[in-house]
Amino acid sequence: MGLFGTLLASTGALQAFQKALEVAQNNVGNVSTPGFAKQRMILEAMPFQAEAGLPGGVTYGGVHDFRDRYAEQAVQRRQEDYGLSDQRVADLTRLEPYFDVTGGQGFPGALDGFYKSISGWSVMPNNQVAREAVIEQATSLAARMVDTANGVLNTRAAADQEIRNTVDTINHLTGILRDLNAQLRQDFRQAEDPAFGARLNSTLEELAEYVEFTTLKQADGTTTVLLGGQTPLVLGDRQYEIHADISSDQARITDAADRDITAQVSRGRLGGVLDVRNNTLPEFLDGLNRLAAGLADRVNAILANGVDLNGQPGAALFAYDTAENAASTLRVTNISAEELAGAAASAPGGNSNVLGLMDLVDSPQIDGASFTAYYGALARNMGQALETAQEDLRTNEQLLLQARTLRNEASGVSLDEEAVHLIEFQRAYQASAKLITVLDDLTEITINLLQ
Amino acid sequence: MPSRDLGAPLIRTGTGILEAQKHLLKPTAEAVEQAGSALERAIDELETLGQRLRSGEPVAEVDQREIRHRLGALKGEARRLRALLEGAAALRLGWARVLYSAACGYTAQGQPRTPDVARRVSLEA
């Protein structure tokens, strides 16, 4: 091989290494770019045959990126869980203040005030001031119940808006994915562009925060996106928008053909807000309606058994429209203080009917609980739901971080290394799992030592 | 805050659990092993507290409530720890399945075939 051949080989190698340097610089420059995956240049050996004038050396053999599809999908699944729990925390935090049981505020304070006014009335059954205090406290009680119910209804309205916004965001993101697919169809070489890959993957990761989906890589390089693994959102260069229907009691999500696909949405922010809107809020509203209707019916029934100061049958103190909206429509009738029936028909002027009202304080009224205890259970359920959601959020934040760590490490791993690591991992896993069980048991034992 | 003597093992238990959690954020065998060491320290501290309570050491009512509250919080952290460990295992095993099936194919039962590493010898200097 002559000087010319040697020079050719050196030039090829220099060009290849120049390219490698560019790839390395690009890696460093994009270290914070969302969705970017590290790249490595492939060096290909050139044939070396001195007598035939083939100079050998190396040449540029293309760029290979370290994107690991499994790790990407693991991050997306964790992102869905994170979106779900973060949305639940946001919605339940909005609801919590309406179920405050601390201090004398809100419905529990008003119920307590109503019972105290009845107690005062029982001592002076014919006293005008004591009777007016009962009507005043009943008015306050009804107003607090309406406040609480309206709080739940306002939270529902906010959830409706949240559903619309989330659906808009999902459609916006799937629109970006459609455009990326269209770009790819126009120029398939885009698939090798790291910036293109970064944009595609960061969009998919963002979408995962809002809704669960699966992706399929097509032969032409485009990405098909299926909501819940079933409903197409993006097919090639076509986008299928989803829609929110909040016109009925249950919010619905429909596909481009107006089919109900709500059941396919259970994760991501959309899954979280739908769960709160369709399950959690109706449950609390139903509880408040039962409480309002139960309290009004029971008080009115006791009053109906007695007679007022004029010996007339007792009039109703509370009213509401229907059992389905009792909490938001609870009010005091236009009853006067004289019309409150404090006495039994057999003993006019007495307080035996008021004593019947006093029994309401502790006696079981709804599902074996007094009105106070029933409200307490509702508020407790609210607090527990929020606490559980906050716990889930903290766990899911950490699991997302864990999946992202795996993704960052998923570069250039050999099969041998992975097999050895897996054996080591299994051993460490078993030991740690046992230790967590010991820790849990020991904590329980220590708690019991205190009792 | 319980009396200083009783509060210290609780704080050290909590620190051990948080340290274990931090290790488990990295789903590698080394990290899980390090988490195990931190857990062992947490368990030791909890055992020390248990022994002192068993020995009949008087504990004020207010301290009992505080300790119970803190132990309840520790149980919550232990639950999260378990979720992280299970998460690490799921990620690692899932990844291994993908790698194995891509490189070695599937068994007749449809499971990814595992590479034969038992007979390999490796030397590290």
Image (cartoon, coloured by chain):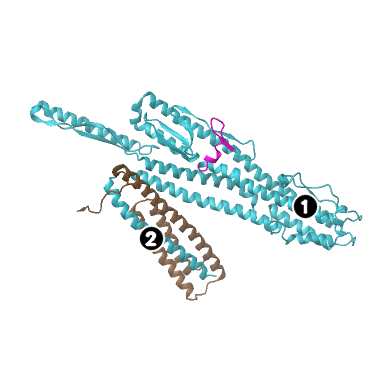
Chain colours: A cyan, B brown
Which secondary structure, mark 2?
Answer: helix
Image position of B69 (left or right of A19): right
Which x, y percent locates residue A296?
76, 51
Label 2 packing within 10 angstroms: few (<14), some (14-19), many (20+) = many
**Which amino acid type corresponds to the residue marked 2 in the rendered image?**
Ala
Secondary structure mainly formed by the magenta segment: loop
Q: Nearer the viewer, mark 2 or mark 1?
A: 1
Which x, y percent locates residue A59?
20, 31
Q: CA distance from mark 2 to mark 1?
A: 60 Å
Establish if A274 lies above or below A354: above
Label 1 packing within 10 angstroms: few (<14), some (14-19), many (20+) = some
Q: Quadrant of the N terminus of chain A?
A: top left
**Which amino acid type corresponds to the residue marked 1 in the rendered image?**
Asp
Subunit under mark 1: A
Labels 2 and 1 within one chain: no
Q: Label 1 near label 2: C-beta < 8 Å?
A: no
> Between residues B38 and A80, which one lies in front from this camera angle?
A80
Where does the magenta region start and end?
A: A252-267
Establish if A390 lies above or below A358: above
Query: Which residue is depicted at the point 42% across and 53% down?
Result: B86
Which x, y percent locates residue A210?
50, 39
Which x, y percent locates residue A339?
87, 52
**Residue B72 within the segment the image draws in magenta:** no
Subunit under mark 2: B
Q: Quadrant of the C terminus of chain A?
A: bottom right
- Residue under circle 2? B38
Query: Which residue is depicted at the point 48% across and 74% down?
Result: B54
Res. A412 visible in picture: no
- Residue under circle 1? A297
